[in-house]
Image (cartoon, rainbow, N blue to C red):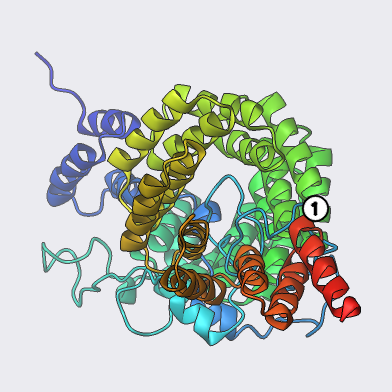
Amino acid sequence: MEQLDPLFFAINLFKRRKFDKSIEVCNEALDANPYDQAFWCLKLRSLTEQVYVDDLEADEEGIAESLMDDNAIAQVARPGTSLKALPTARSMQTSQSIRPVTQSGRPLTGMLRPGTQGRLGTMENALKTPRTARTARPLTSSSGRFVRMGTTSMLTQPDGPFINLSRLNIGKYAAIPTLAKPLFEYIFFQENNIRVALELAAKATEVNQFKDWFWKVQLGKCYYKLGMIRDAEKQFRSALKHNEVPVEVYLWLGKVYERLDQPLAALDVYSEGLNKYPGETYLLTYAARIHELMNEMDDSIKLYKEVLTYDAINIEAIASIAVNHFYNDQPEIALRYYRRILQMGTCNTQIYNNLGLSCYLSQQFDMAITCFERALIFSESDDVTADIWYNIGHLAIGSGDKQLASQCFRLALVSNNDHSEAYNNLGVIEMSKSNATTTNIQQAKAYFQTSATIGKHLYEPHYNQALLAEKMGHYDMSFSYAKKSLDLYADHYGSQQLLNKVRKLYENV
């Protein structure tokens, strides 16, 4: 029986994504002939595929880039032209007092993506964000992963790195098209050495007489990773002058303008890409995200619905539309979307939590209890567990069991001691007791003050303090708290009524 050709066998393993076995076959061949370019190239590809990630989605802006960015154009941007400016009440289509918001004050959307949990404006906010690097220095794009570099070549030290980059002849490999591209991807993704990758891309661009869009895109990616945003913009713009460029170029250029805080320019780029690639879901999704960051929820949902016409199983679009229906008092429609996500195989605590809320507001109490139980089983984060107990507390209030509700809110505080909504509701329970004593009133006041301190965007604790002060005859304090509530939520009917009531009392005096 004839033995399979080793190269064919290794390629077959690579195509079946059995990268470890493919590397083993390549190692055996390279031990016999270290200069076999076919096996060398295949091993590069296999090592790269093991760690390859979509860097468009996985790129996270670190602390250093956020606080030391020197690409700002204007300190005070015009409304609707900046992603870093805090949203105003007029720009909010859904009140930030009703819908949960990020640290920067923007509404939470249906998906958690890198860089969407708030723009870092102060050092205090920056230090509160988790770091992905294993060092104490602020994270930068080029320090996301650390690789131990060897000092000798693979031939002299079997346990060393596959390629010793310090001894690599960049000019030689840049002139070989079949080796240059896999070598670049290996250096960029596996070794994470952006500077060497940049040097190789620059040499290869020169060898190809500046006519290959691929190398211009790679140069732009290297410049972007190194924080040279303007240089990256030039490379991506130059790549767009070629006829046959992929969608990736438009996406990267849009990310550049987003990093430069020019959302309108990013939207223009995506629109230009959609003219060339009509119905491209990636371009529609990225444009929808920009509208989300600019608090243009109606435009964002319109684009997400267009995404679903081309890709009916796009989880991000389904989740974002669902959360928008939920906060627009349409829980029955939101329930249908969340059930669709569950049917597609996405099973996690967030889905069950949202299903439970939608069932509760749709008057399906038995299903709501089951969903919250499942959410607690799948929960792995204290913050998420706190939200689940908080929602179960609301379910208990709806059924009239205030004692169970109080226990649920306390369990929420056990998981997350900074849960401002739980403090507020505990205060409401203390204040609403039929035989409330002075101790209950003082306890409720303490809960409201803690909630107002932690949740600076919440209007409820201020309104409740106003009610408590009015009940105790402190009308000046009641007036002050009602004003604070209306500053956060100008259309709150209860605060307006209380403010008018206190005003009339002063007028009669």
Where residue 10 appears, x then y in whole percent?
25, 34
- Residue at the location (23% across, 29% down)? 9
Which amino acid lies under the numbered mark 1 shown in the image of this protein?
A: Gln
Judge left or right: residue 458 versus residue 239. Answer: left
Judging depth in this view, the residue of 495 and 265 nearest the camera is 495
- Residue at the location (58% across, 39% down)? 316
Please name the residue that numbered disc 1 is placed on. 93
- Residue at the location (64% across, 38% down)? 326
Figure quadrant of residue 61: bottom right
Where residue 165 appears, x then y in whole percent?
33, 71
Judging depth in this view, the residue of 196 and 17 nearest the camera is 17
Where residue 432 appears, x then y in whole percent?
52, 56
Q: Residues within 10 Å of mark 1 (few under 14, many from 20)?
A: few
Q: Quadrant of the C terminus?
A: bottom right
Q: Quadrant of the N terminus?
A: top left
Where residue 174 appears, x then y in whole percent?
49, 62
Judge left or right: residue 342 versus residue 167. Answer: right
Whether 40 is drawn above or below 307: the answer is below
